[in-house]
Image: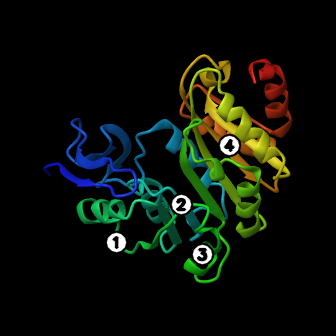
């Protein structure tokens, strides 16, 4: 497949889908020249980016294995995790929200979704769309919400406030999980701010990351998981074993301790 490019009206950046260069069925979505998503059309369960694999393992915790779920994606990208959910849990009801009107059409036209995918796309601001999530899922609360829009302090202010997390918690199923990808620079000041915000809203907040990220010395991605359920030993061991490695999995107490030990630069 040759590359395809469109101009995004909200950001003004070009979006391009092109072959990944190392497999016959893999493709990359680039936005503004930066790699944003990877999709393997031959195997939707193959997730290239390590932080998305960690979120995929969180999704695997919801309900019984293979059971359809309700999922909301705030930040659609190339719909990598929507594809994963359909492949691992056929019949799931999903909704994806993206502020870039042209992006979902570019993606679905050139990287078709797996057969049977039940996905509604909303073109809207992530926070403005929160009241529309359950209606888009047939009136059912999302069992998992994936928030994948953060790139450090450049994130819009209204999306990094504790009140946004409260709104997400209100629409999340009682036993549901909110998985948040937080990209940050060395020092992790933005990640620490988001972790504190979530700890103020959810009974339990877990952190999944490459172990090196917790040193605060490197740029990269960390995953925060908000839940009404504590991280038990079995779940921790499952997440650690699933990787990617080296994998660290912190519960609320450990995350709070880590924040206290690394807060001097805030």
In the rendered image, which residue does mark 2 sit on?
73
Element at label 2: strand
Q: CA distance from mark 4 to mark 3?
A: 23 Å
Q: Nearer the viewer, residue 66 or 178?
A: 178
| Residue 155 seen in render | yes
- Tell me which numbered mark, 4 or 1, is placed earlier along the sequence: 1
Q: Where is residue 161 shown, x and y percent of the image?
A: 72, 49
Q: Is residue 172 left or right of residue 125?
A: right
The residue at 58%/25% (across/down) is: 246
Q: CA distance from mark 2 to mark 3?
A: 12 Å
In the rendered image, which residue does mark 1 sit on?
115
Q: CA distance from mark 4 to mark 2?
A: 15 Å
Q: Mark 3 or 1, which is nearer the eye?
A: 3
Which mark, residue 224?
4
Crowding at mark 2 (Cα within 10 Å: few <14, some 14-19, many 20+): many
- Tell me which numbered mark, 1 or 2, is placed earlier along the sequence: 2
Where 84 sits versus 133, above or below? above
Coloring basis for residues: rainbow
- Tell me which numbered mark, 4 or 2, is placed earlier along the sequence: 2
Q: Nearer the viewer, residue 203 or 117?
A: 203
Q: CA distance from mark 3 to mark 1?
A: 25 Å
Q: Please say if the residues under marks 4 and 1 sit with CB atoms less than 8 Å apart.
A: no
Q: Mark 1 or 2, which is nearer the eye?
A: 2
In the rendered image, which residue does mark 3 sit on?
132
Q: Mark 2 or 3, which is nearer the eye?
A: 3
Element at label 1: loop
- Tell me which numbered mark, 3 or 1, is placed earlier along the sequence: 1
Where 85 sits versus 58, above or below? below
Which mark, residue 161?
none
Element at label 3: helix
């Amino acid at each position: 497949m040759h590359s395809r490019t469109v101009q995004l009206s909200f950001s003004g950046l070009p979006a391009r889908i092109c072959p990944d260069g190392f497999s016959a069925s893999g493709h990359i979505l680039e936005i503004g020249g930066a790699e944003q998503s990877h999709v393997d059309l031959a195997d939707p369960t193959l997730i290239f980016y390590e932080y998305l694999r960690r979120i995929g393992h969180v999704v695997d915790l919801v309900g019984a294995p293979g059971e359809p779920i309700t999922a909301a994606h705030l930040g659609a990208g190339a719909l990598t995790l929507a594809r994963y959910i359909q492949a691992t849990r056929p019949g799931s009801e999903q909704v994806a929200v993206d502020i870039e009107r042209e992006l979902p059409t570019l993606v679905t036209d050139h990287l078709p979704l797996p057969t049977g995918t039940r996905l509604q796309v909303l073109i809207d601001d992530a926070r403005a769309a929160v009241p529309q999530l359950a209606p888009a899922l047939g009136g059912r609360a999302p069992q998992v919400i994936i928030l994948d829009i953060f790139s450090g302090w450049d994130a819009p202010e209204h999306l990094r406030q504790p009140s946004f997390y409260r709104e997400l918690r209100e629409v999340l199923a009682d036993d549901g999980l909110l998985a948040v990808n937080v990209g940050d620079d060395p020092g992790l000041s933005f990640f620490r701010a988001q972790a504190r915000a979530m700890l103020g809203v959810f009974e339990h907040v877990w952190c999944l990351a490459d172990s090196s990220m917790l040193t605060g010395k490197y740029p990269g991605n960390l995953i925060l998981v908000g839940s009404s359920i504590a991280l038990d030993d079995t779940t921790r061991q499952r997440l650690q074993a699933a990787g990617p490695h080296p994998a660290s999995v912190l519960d609320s107490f450990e995350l709070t301790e880590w924040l206290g030990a690394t807060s001097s630069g805030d």
